[in-house]
Image (tube, rainbow, N blue to C red):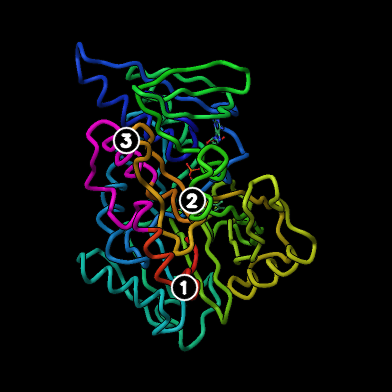
Amino acid sequence: MAVVGLGSMGAMALWQLAKRNARSGSSRMTLLGIEQYGGVHAAGAYAGESRLFRVAAKEGRLYTPALLHARRLWQELGASTGRDLLIQAGALSIGPAGHGDLEATLASIAEHELPHEVLDHAELRERYPQFAVREEDIGVLDTLGGAVRPEAAVLAAMEQALEHGAQVATGTEVTAIEPERDGVLITTAAGERIRAGRAVVTAGPWTTRLLPELSELIEVVSYALTWLMPRHIEHFTPSRFPGFMRDLDEVHAFGVPTLDGYSIKICPHVDLPAGTDIGGLTLTLDREQLRWAGEQARRMIPDLMPEPVRWSVHPEGRTADKMPVIDTLADGRIVVAGGMSGNGFKFAPVYGQALAELALDGASEWRHEEFTVAAHQRRRESCAQPPERGTDR
Ligand SMILES: Cc1cc2nc3c(=O)[nH]c(=O)nc-3n(C[C@H](O)[C@H](O)[C@H](O)COP(=O)(O)OP(=O)(O)OC[C@H]3O[C@@H](n4cnc5c(N)ncnc54)[C@H](O)[C@@H]3O)c2cc1C
C-alpha cells in the first residue's frame, strides 16, 4: 500500500494504516508513504504555525461527531509522541446576534449538548477586553475548541507511522498513478516505478495533477495568513485569549493566541483568485492587501500595531460547496481525499482514519455519502447557481 502526499491527510492516513498494520501479525503488508518535499515543509496547505480547531461545527450536523472524534485522536497523537499539538484555549465566535454562522454554531451545540458559554456584549467586554465589541454582538465560546500546531502534528503522525513499521520516501515526486489489473503503478519524477496494491492519494492542492478526472470538482485557491503585534502581548497568551472567529460588517476574520511570544495570528479574509492548477496561484500579498488586513485587524483588536509583521499565503484545494471529496476510484485501487476547502486541518486525523478504513475495509463511518464523487456531481448538476460557500475556518 502506498500513500502519495504526506501533508495533513496523508501523514494521518499513514499513521492510521500503520497502526492497523502493526496489529495484523503475519498478514502485515509493506506500507510506503511518498512525499515530494522534505518530511515537514512550507509549500502545502498546512504550513503556518497554527490551525483553528472547533468542535461546534457551523457547517452542519455531519461534522460535529467527526470533530469530537478528531479531538480524541489529536490528544492520542500528542500523548503518544510527547508533543503539544492541541492548544485548548477555546474557540470564540463573535458577531451580531442572529448572524448565520453563530446560529449554526449554536444549533450544533444544542444538538450535541456541547460544553459552551454564550456571552452578551457586556460579558464579552469584561471577559475579553482585547476585542472591540458592539452592542449588537454576542460571543459563543466552544470550550472544547482552540488550535492545533500543524507542522508538529504532521511530524508526529509520521513518527508514529515509522514507529509502527511504515516506510517513508521524502524528496520523491510522483508523476503518475495508473490502475493495473492487481493494483496500481506509481511513477516518480526520477523514473522509478513502484507497484502497490492500493494508493491513497492525499496530494492536497496538487490532487488534480495526479487525478485530472477530479478537475471539474476541485479548484485550487490560496488563503492568506497574517500576524500582527499587540502592544501588550501578555493579554494574548492561550490562558487569557482564545482561538476566535470574528464577523464585523462584511469582514470575516479568524485568529489564534500568541505562540511565538510577540505576535498573534489574525487573518481578515483576503479574497485571492482561484485557478485550475497550483502553478497559476498568487502566493503573496501586495502592500495594499497588507494595509487592508492591518486596518481590519485593528478594528477588531485595537491593541494591535498597524500592519502585519509577518504573513504567508498557502495553496488549497476547494470544492463548490466546501465539502471534501473522500472516495475510492478505479474499483477501490485508488482512495482519495482532496478539496479540503480551507477547513480541513481540524479533521485531519479522523479523515486519515476514514482513508485507512476505505483502503483496508472498503467503508468507513467517517466517510459520509455526501463526500463521494457521485454526490458532488449530483449537487453540481442540480445547482443552477453556485452554492453558498459559507465562511472560512
Ligand atoms: C492559509 C490556510 C489556513 C487554514 N486555516 C485552517 C484552520 O484554521 N483550521 C482548519 O481546520 N483548516 C484550515 N485550513 C485548511 C487545512 O490547512 C487544509 O484543509 C489541509 O491542510 C489540507 O490538507 P491536505 O492533506 O489536503 O493538503 P496538504 O497538507 O498540502 O498535503 C498535501 C501533500 O502532498 C504532497 N504532494 C503533492 N503532490 C505530490 C506528488 N506528486 N508527489 C509526492 N507528494 C506530493 C505535498 O507536498 C503535501 O505535503 C487552512 C488552509 C490554508 C491554506
Q: Bounds of the magenta span?
A: 348-375
Q: Quadrant of residue 64?
A: bottom left
Q: How much space separates mark 2 and mark 3, taking CA atoms? A: 31 Å
Residue on which disc 3 sits: 332
* Residues at circles 1 and 2 in contact by the CB criterion of under 8 Å: no
Disc 1 versus disc 3: nearer the observer: 3
Q: Is residue 277 above or below residue 60?
A: above
Taking depth in this image into account, of 157 and 229 the one nearest to the observer is 157
* Residues at circles 1 and 3 in contact by the CB criterion of under 8 Å: no
The residue most toward the front is 181
Residue on which disc 1 sits: 388
Q: How much space separates mark 1 and mark 2, taking CA atoms? A: 23 Å
Q: Is residue 141 above or below residue 187?
A: below
Q: Residue at x 56, y 54 (%)?
A: 219
First in sequence: mark 1 or mark 2? 2
First in sequence: mark 1 or mark 3? 3
Query: Label 1's element?
Result: loop
For the N terminus, the quadrant is top left
Q: Amino acid at mark 3?
A: Gly
Q: Amino acid at mark 2?
A: Arg
Q: Quadrant of residue 159?
A: top left
| Residue 113 position within the rendered picture, expressed as x and y whole percent measured from the top left | 20, 66
Q: Is residue 392 left or right of residue 13?
A: right
Q: Is mark 2 within 8 Å of ligand 1?
A: yes
First in sequence: mark 2 or mark 3? 2
Q: Is residue 301 left or right of residue 73?
A: right
Q: Is residue 184 magenta?
A: no
